[in-house]
Amino acid sequence: MPLTPRTGALRRWLLAVLLLAGAVFLIRHFVQLEQFIALARRAQPAWLIAALVLQFSTYVSVVSGWNAVLGRAGHAQSLRRLIPIAVSKLFADQAVPGAGMGGNVLLIDRLTALGTPRAPAMAALLVSMIGFYAAYAALAVVMLLTLWSHRQATPLLTGVVTTFLLVALAIPSLALWLRHRGSQPLSPRLEGIGPLRRLLAAISEAPDALVKDRHLIGRVAVFNAMIFLADAATLAACLRAVGDPFEPSIAFVALMSGSIAMTLTPIPLGLGSFEASCIAMLTLLGVKLEPAVAATLLLRGLTLWLPLFLGLILIRRQRKPSP
């Protein structure tokens, strides 16, 4: 898509907003950042490196899901070009909370800047969303079965997971409904909201052949499942880095518990809700409180603070006008 003066100005405006929001976020949560740095210095280096490698693999999984859609449309991109977009999107999602809207806009912007037509770019976004929630829901069920095997599947936890499954079904269903009616006129009140009108129009551009391809959705769901599993392995590595036994199944249940709490609570980025739920689940399954707290904070540093810094650097580079 050619870069017109108008689109170039909008792109620089978007990146400027993201930079400002990221800076404000870092300042507001500087204490948590200091805690992460202190814990990282005391952690066992080999296991910390393993955790970093696992986190890098999550970005490879993210872009592999996008590329599965783009490749199906005949517009595949190299992983080297897509991984910086994945980091930038995560930064945008964290810096400007709002159902991932900031990151979604950035994803479409960067894909089109690489020469991807808008239709396959929108399909990559929609299919990735469907695949993400499909994997998320399936792993939530696995989490509940694992809790049953540990005899910890209380009625409260079962109810929370059931509520989450309803949410996981509702979100992609809403996206598909919006896509179905995207080209239809909105009510006069909603028609006056320019960003919403343009978003619905853009969603309607995603080709049916991609959005309804079950095999493609299944592949993308597998890539998204790998992200959760890598995050769980990262938590297990963080537990080992602070001197606790390496317990992948316990780490998986705790990671999913924290993720579900983050999804169901209205707190931006799940700050506090993820940590509390993850730590509570770790201790419920036999991990001592001190290593549970330390490992959870290390995990959040790797999944939240590190992407913020890397994303901030990438956004600053992208903001510079092309020669």
Image (tube, rainbow, N blue to C red):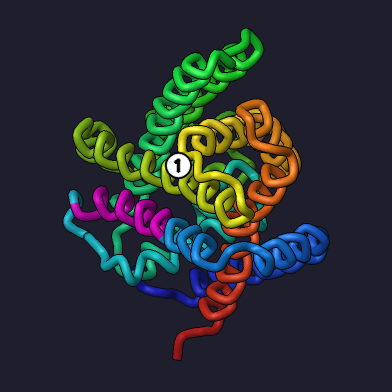
Task: Pinpoint residue 94: horizontal percent, then vertical percent.
Answer: 63, 54
Pick the residue in front: 149 or 136.
Answer: 149
Task: Pinpoint residue 96: horizontal percent, then vertical percent.
Answer: 66, 54
Horizontal relation, residue 276 to residue 155: left or right: right
- Does the segment drawn in magenta span residue 58? yes
Horizontal relation, residue 122 to residue 175: left or right: left
Task: Pinpoint residue 197: horizontal percent, then vertical percent.
Answer: 53, 43
Pick the residue in front: 212 or 296.
Answer: 296
The C terminus appears in which quarter of the rendering? bottom left
Q: Would you say the magenta stretch is mainly helix, strand or loop?
A: helix
The N terminus appears in which quarter of the rendering? bottom left
Residue occupied by mark 1: 228
Displayed quadrant of residue 205: top left
Q: Is residue 169 above or below residue 64?
A: above
Q: Is residue 77 above or below residue 224?
A: below
Residue 189 visible to an observer of this rendering: no
Q: Secondary structure at mark 1?
A: helix
- Does the segment drawn in magenta span residue 254? no
